[in-house]
Every structure is written in C-alpha cells, then in structure tokens.
Image: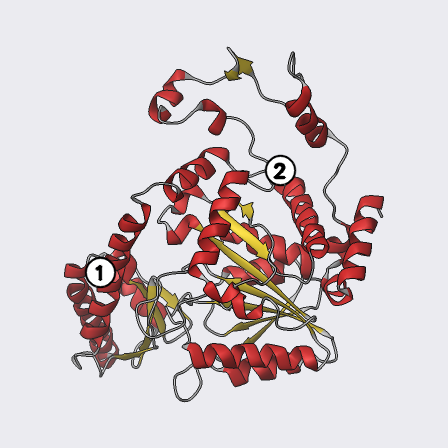
Amino acid sequence: MNPLASQLNETLQRENSHVHDMLSALGKSIYFPKEGILSQSAEAKAKAKKFNATIGIAIENGQPMHLKVIQDTLSTYNPKDIYEYAPPAGKPELRTAWRKKMLEENPGIGNKLIGNPIVTNALTHGLSIAADLFADIGDAVIIPDKNWENYELTFEIRRGAQIVNYPLYNEQERFNSEGLRDALLAQKSKGKAIVVLNFPNNPTGYTPDIEDGNAITAAIKEAAEAGINVVVLTDDAYFGLFFENSLHESLFGQLADLHPRVLAVKIDGATKEEYVWGFRVGFITYAGQSDALLSALEQKTMGIIRATISSGPHPSQTFVLHALNSPEFNAQKQEKYEIMKGRANRTKSILDSGKFDDAWGYYPFNSGYFMCLKLKTVDAEALRIHLLNQHGVGTIALGETDLRVAFSCIEEGNLEELFNIIYQSVKEIETVAASK
C-alpha cells in the first residue's frame, strides 16, 4: 500500500476507528498524491514568476489561450475563470460560498464539525465517490422500495454491494421508520450498513415531517448502539423544494454528531436546486469528530476524483459561483420556487377532485419534482406506451402499478389536460381489454 494511503488510514484509525472500518478496500487504498504533476504545478503557480512550464494548458498574452468564437459568447467572464483546470476539490471560492449557503439553509448543523464541500460532477458523481470509498462486495445498501434506479448501477453493479429494500410508506402512509430500523438491525452480523436517504424522494416527491425525521435518526442511532457502523448518505438532490409541512432541512444536520459509529455524508448540488441541470455541479460534504479525520476523508475523496475525472469543469463552477454571489439570486430563486409550488399544489387539487378515483390513487407527495400514481386497473408499462404512441404524452412506468409524473416540466395551466389524457388512456386500454 502506498505510504500516503497508509498515513491517511492511520489518521482515521486514530481519530475514529469505526470510520476507518467503514472504508472499502478501494477506500483504504486510495490517496491524493502529494508529489506529482498537480502538486508541482501548484507550487510553480505560487512561485514561478518568470516562466511556468508545468501544467498542460496553453498561455497566450498572459492568459489562457482560447478561441474568439467561444470567448465571444462568454465575454462576461475572465478567461482565467473559464479555461484553466479547476482544482480537483473544486474552485475554492465556490466551496466557500456553498458552505455558507448550506449553513444558512440548515441551521440544525449549528456548530457541529463538518468539512468544506468538495465539488463533484453533479450528484451522481458524488454518490459514485461514496460508493467507491465505502461499498465493498456484499455490503448492504439500504434504500426504500420507491427509489431512483441509478442506485442499483452505482452501488450494486459497479461495486458489488447488496441492495436491501424496505417499504417507503407504512400503513398510515407516513415514512416507514420501522422498516428502516428493521433493515438496519438485520445487518448486525455484517457490522456495517450504508443508508441512502433521498428527500424529496425520487420518484414520489415525498419528504417526511419533523416527527418522522426524528424517528429516522433514532433508528440509525439504535443500529449504531447495536454495534453497526452506518454510513448515511443524504441525497439532497431536490433540497429546498419543500411545499408543505415537512422537514425543511437536510437530516445531515441531525446525523452530523449522532454517534461515533455513524458517518454522515451530504451529497447535494446546484443541478436541481438552481435549475442548472446541464452544468453538472454537485458537492460532497462530510461530518466528523475532528479536523484531522475530515482532512483524511477529503484527501481520499480527491484521490478518487483525480483517478476518475481529474477535476470538474471550471466554466460551470464559475457560473454557479457568479449566481450565488449575485444580489438578485435569492429573489429569482424564490420566484421559481413559487412556480414549482403552484404546480405541485395544482396537481394535488386535480387528483383530489374525485374524478379519477376509479382509475388510480396516488402516493403522498409534498415536495420535489415528481409524484406517482398508483394505478388500479391497468399495467403501468402498457399505459406508458399507450400514452406515448396514441397521445404523444411521456411518463415513467415503475413496476406494474406506479406511473411517475414530473409536474415540474408541465405548465400549471396544462396539468388538468395532462391528467385528463392519462385518465382517457386508462379507459381506452380498459375498453380494448374488455372486448377481447
């Protein structure tokens, strides 16, 4: 094992042996090289005032070489903030700005010790980093039965972990904290579990309330007290889009100092929150018991980044930083929030009208981009295909009964027509089935 990796592992072992034990084999082996092209280039950038012949970019007239046809469309920005490589951990000013935003929006973090957010190539990359660092073959990754399908690729296919499902809702149609607790305690013989908490949930658009949030935290703490090392990933992709009486903070704050056997990892980003999906700017943030522990985790994370994408795109980081620092940012974001809330509320009022009750129910939703219909009489995939081929309407089929509808991308005035078409399609499929 490389001496740098050994040194990081020794730090983790000393600061919190449970966190060390959570690491995968890759997580134990990875490190960020202190000697090499990046470190020597960084040293030269600070000291090489005459000539700097280190990093693999081209310079012209004292600034990064660029094509006028590109710079003309980006003339607001200085070439040094667009064309150079961003550091592996991300643009320092952006990391600082995102941390400030995170603390303002999650007062529950308070004075708890958290690291500086590390820039990722959006949230999928952040989840992939966490999978590389903590998931080994056979490790349990606990997620609800209503989940984003990419978790399977990220944790099970790439890393060989075992997906463990529990029902998202209990009989009262609230978050099933008992199901989470049981799934966690079932891992006692393994001594380790990875939990993914995704609120607002994709695909259902559901976020628990404060009471259920406390129950989630209690379940995780109980597992830790039972001797299980728990890595908790809060997938906060749709953070801030809370439209009703639910949690309005990430559970990361509650989990940050919950127990020495609990490692809280926040994965979030500008993609959904700031409506910049194609920018691919995300963040991964750790909570811990000491600065030394957080530094070691950061070094290992930078090692994963260096070994995969080297660093994230600089232009989009600059664009997001510019937005965060703009005096108009909060007002413009609030304007878009109100539009999204209006679409969610209109969707709920349409569904609660009673006119569709013979065709479907729906899973509780109060946040995010989506909601899921619970079909009563037709197959979800058959309905999806019929909607697409006969009416030019796109939806997502999940299993036999669930149809995901993204109200986020439908103007409020068109929502009733959308659900009328879905209902019409159900009836058309029923008529064909009855005639056979």
Camera sees residue 218: yes
Report the quarter where the C terminus lies.
bottom left
Q: Earlier in the sequence, mark 1 or mark 2?
A: 2
Q: Is residue 298 above or below residue 198?
A: above
Q: What numbered label is drawn on residue 310?
A: 2
Q: Left or right? Give the position of 54 relative to 85.
A: right
Q: Left or right? Give the position of 6 relative to 45.
A: right
| Residue 358 or residue 103, whichever sits in front | 103
Q: Is residue 423 above or below residue 160?
A: below
Disc 1 target residue: 390
| Residue 99 or residue 426, whichever sits in front | 99
- Give the image location of residue 263, x and y in percent: 64, 65
- Give the image location of residue 26, x and y in percent: 74, 53
Q: What numbered label is drawn on residue 146?
A: none
> Disc 1 residue type?
Gln
Residue closest to the far front: 111
1 vs 2, front mark: 2
> Disc 2 residue type?
Ser
Q: Is disc 2 placed on a helix, strand or loop?
A: loop
Distance from the alpha carbon under mark 1 to that under mark 2: 46 Å
- Residue at (54, 45) in percent of width and height: 119
Q: Is residue 100 above or below residue 156?
A: above
Could you tell me if the residues under marks 1 and 2 are in contact, i.e. CB atoms within 8 Å? no
- Give the image location of residue 304, x and y in percent: 66, 46
Q: Is residue 64 above or below residue 179?
A: above
